[in-house]
Amino acid sequence: MKATVKINQLTYKKNLKTILADVSLDVSGDKIIGILGENGAGKTTLFRIISGVAKNYRGDVAINGKTSPADRKSLVSYSQSLGGFPENKRISQVANFHEQIYPDFDRDKYNQMIDFLSLDVTQRLAALSKGTKEKVIVALTLARKTSVYLLDEPFGGIDSMSRKKIINSIIQWKPTDSLMLISDHYVSEIASILDEIVVLKDHTVAIHKRADDVRQESGKSIEDYYESLYEEGAQK
Amino acid sequence: MTNMTRLIPTFLKERFKAVNRLIMLMLTAIVATAVVQLFTNGVSNWETSLTGDVSFWSGIAFFVIFIRLASFNEHIYVNDAFRLIPISDTKLYLSSYSASALAFLYYGVISAVLHGLVAFVTKGQLQVNFHIESSFFWSSAPVAVPMIIVFFFLGLLLVWMTISLIHLIMVSIAAFLPVGRQRLIRGVLYVVVSVVIIRVVMGLFQLYSQFVMTSGLQLNGTSVLLAFLSVIIVLILESAANVLLMKRFVETAL
């Protein structure tokens, strides 16, 4: 079955501030889609709504036609921050927890990724650098067999070697029939692997285009095109 | 989808670890206190001292374990690690409480065994206590003891669920407050919501006791059954409110 994410007229407010306003988005297939936008554009909120942890929004969200949060949670693997685990937990204990609670967790795939990313599973969460933590999060997220993967800023504040490792693991371990949404504001990191881009600006979807169309129509790289959107906004 | 039979053992594992750690601390404290008292007071009164030590430290452990398990319950509502589990909010809620109740039951069994052992070792104390109250004890124990245990557990759940209700109402309200001065407003609201919830729960029990008084019921089978029923109704109402808040408003912390 082709993976689909359909969002219709989604509006979300928190603490009397509008985060997302009238967002509609329809993405499907086995693509990698970049959700781009500056800090505070609503990328994380969008992912949290899709994955079923954010509440109190207006509009419709469906994954493969399923709208209930429990169904969506079973169809989505979301890169959570590991903040819910005590800092003294070891990587292996966090993986064991995931294996116990997610019926779709693939232990073999996880072990392969751990080897590929050169992670020491006996390390405690408190001892992990930002880059190592991101690698653990990516391994845990991709180890589930789901229709949709949501990677929320997987390259934030980490060194170039770790970034390359994470991008390579995404290419290598993304299931062929799954849809992947990656959010970031450093476009250059992920531009080469994107099939489509969605730019969030002014609380809504400003652009949704195929990456190749962007390059052809604008004659610019994805990164330059994305930056030009903000420059235009600043000039207005 | 994750099912409850998979989730409860996972939740239990963490809770058992925490309870075991506290039981070890309790045993260490009992032994240390008993040794110190043996050296300071001599061997003459050691039975009385030991019984007192066990009661004191198991009481402290009871309180700490109660708080620790309550914090496990509350942690689940606001963390991605748990709220992302593909299961309905109702089942997540019930799994958490089942695991906490089982962990507390486990502590209850360990504590009962410990008290039994001490009673066995300090044989004289046990005989005196039983001699005084034997006639009442042997006639009512088969019915009274299980009833007290069940009532105790219902009370335990009631306090935990009331704590959850206050917590979930506060998390829900916080999403609608302005960003500035959140701490001050939340502080005031915590006090107001706590007082209101506790008064509502107390009011429900007052209504029940008034009903018992006016209907002229004494402490017999019917009134005991009604007491159980009233606690269960409050538990169901609180649980329904908690699950509704989880479904509609309660989000995880970023």
Image (spheres, coloured by chain):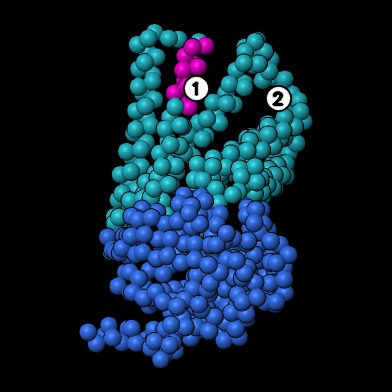
Chain colours: A blue, B cyan
Answer few, some or many: residues within 10 Å of disc 1's Cα (few below 14, many 20 plus, some between 14 and 19).
some
Residue A116 appears at what percent x and percent y?
70, 77
Q: Earlier in the sequence, mark 2 or mark 1?
A: 2
Taking the spot 24% from the left edge, 87% from the top edge, the residue there is A235
Mark 2 to mark 1 CA distance (whole Å): 34 Å
Disc 2 marks which amino acid? Gln
Q: Chain of mark 1?
A: B
The stretch of residues the image draws in magenta is B221-232
Q: Nearer the viewer, residue A206 or A42?
A: A206
Taking the spot 40% from the left edge, 39% from the top edge, the residue there is B241
Q: Which residue is mark 1?
A: B228
Answer few, some or many: residues within 10 Å of disc 2's Cα (few below 14, many 20 plus, some between 14 and 19).
some
Residue B67 appears at what percent x and percent y?
53, 45
In the picture, the disc for residue B206 is none
Taking the spot 48% from the left edge, 57% from the top edge, the residue there is A63
Q: Residue furthest left?
A: A236
- Considering the whole magenta stretch, tell me its main secondary structure: helix
The quarter in which the C terminus of chain B is drawn is: bottom left
The nearer-to-camera label among 2 and 1 is 1
Taking the spot 72% from the left edge, 33% from the top edge, the residue there is B113
Residue A122 visible in the snapshot: no
Which secondary structure lies at badge 2? helix
Residue B30 visible in the snapshot: yes
Q: Quadrant of residue B177?
A: bottom left
User: Does B214 appear in magenta?
Assistant: no
User: With respect to residue B82, does B195 lie above or below?
Assistant: above
Left or right? Give the position of A219 relative to A72.
left
Residue B253 appears at what percent x and percent y?
44, 59
Which secondary structure lies at badge 1? helix
Is the Cβ of the residue at disc 2 closer than 8 Å to that at disc 1? Answer: no
Q: Which residue is mark 2?
A: B125
